[in-house]
Image: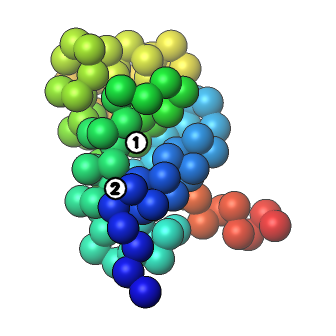
Amino acid sequence: MRKNKENYFDLVYQVVMLIPKGRVTSYGAIANYLGIKSGARMVGYAMNASHTMPGIPAHRVVNREGVLTGKHHFSSPSRMQELLELEGIRVEKDKILNFEEYFWDPIELEQEG
């Protein structure tokens, strides 16, 4: 059964809400967790649409290399970096330094439970 876009977006947002403060994840990790192979682009679409919704920590979702590819969808080009830095994550030239240290994989949820 194929899920419609709105339902898929809601599932993405549910995962994004679980990202711990001071950690980040990638579009692909979310797609993998949701069982949607090659769904990173769809996660990106969901994140782009989330900026009008309060409470979605979209700044915690980056590309697989730690690059702030979604920064242009924030209120200013530097806002995503500012929000990450408020959580103790260092960013230089639009890339998270020591990305592996901050990366959170939603698959960890299944391993905990």
> What label does residue 25 carry, if any?
none
Residue 34, given in percent of the width and then of the height, sits at: 49, 69
Q: Relative to 94, say whether 76 is above or below.
A: above
Q: Can see residue 71?
A: yes
Q: How would you rate the neighbour count of disc 2 (Cα within 10 Å): few for under 14, some for 14-19, many for 20 or more?
A: many
Residue 25 versus residue 76 in the image, above or below: below
Which dot marks residue 61? 1
Which residue reaches farthest right? 113
Q: Residues within 10 Å of mark 1 (few under 14, many from 20)?
A: many
Q: Which amino acid, mark 1?
A: Val
Q: Quadrant of the N terminus?
A: bottom left
Q: Nearer the viewer, mark 1 or mark 2?
A: 2
Compare residues 23 and 37 and report the one nearer the observer: 37
Element at badge 1?
Answer: strand
Residue depicted at x 79% and y 64%: 112
Q: Position of residue 42 (x, y in %)?
A: 28, 60
Residue at coordinates 48% horizontally, 41% vertically from top-left? 24
Sequence order check: which comes first, mark 1 or mark 2?
Answer: 2
The residue that mark 2 highlights is 43
Image quarter of the C terminus: bottom right
Q: Residue at x 52, y 68 (%)?
A: 33
Disc 2 marks a residue whose amino acid type is Val
The reply to whether the C-beta atoms of the residues labelled 1 and 2 are less than 8 Å apart is yes
Name the image quarter holding residue 47: top left
Horizontal relation, residue 108 to residue 97: left or right: right
Q: Position of residue 19 (x, y in %)?
A: 58, 42
Q: Residue 7 occupies which quadrant of the picture? A: bottom left
Tell me if residue 50 comes above or below residue 85 in the rendering.
below
**Horizontal side, residue 17 vs residue 67: left or right:** right
- What is the basis of the colouring in this image? rainbow
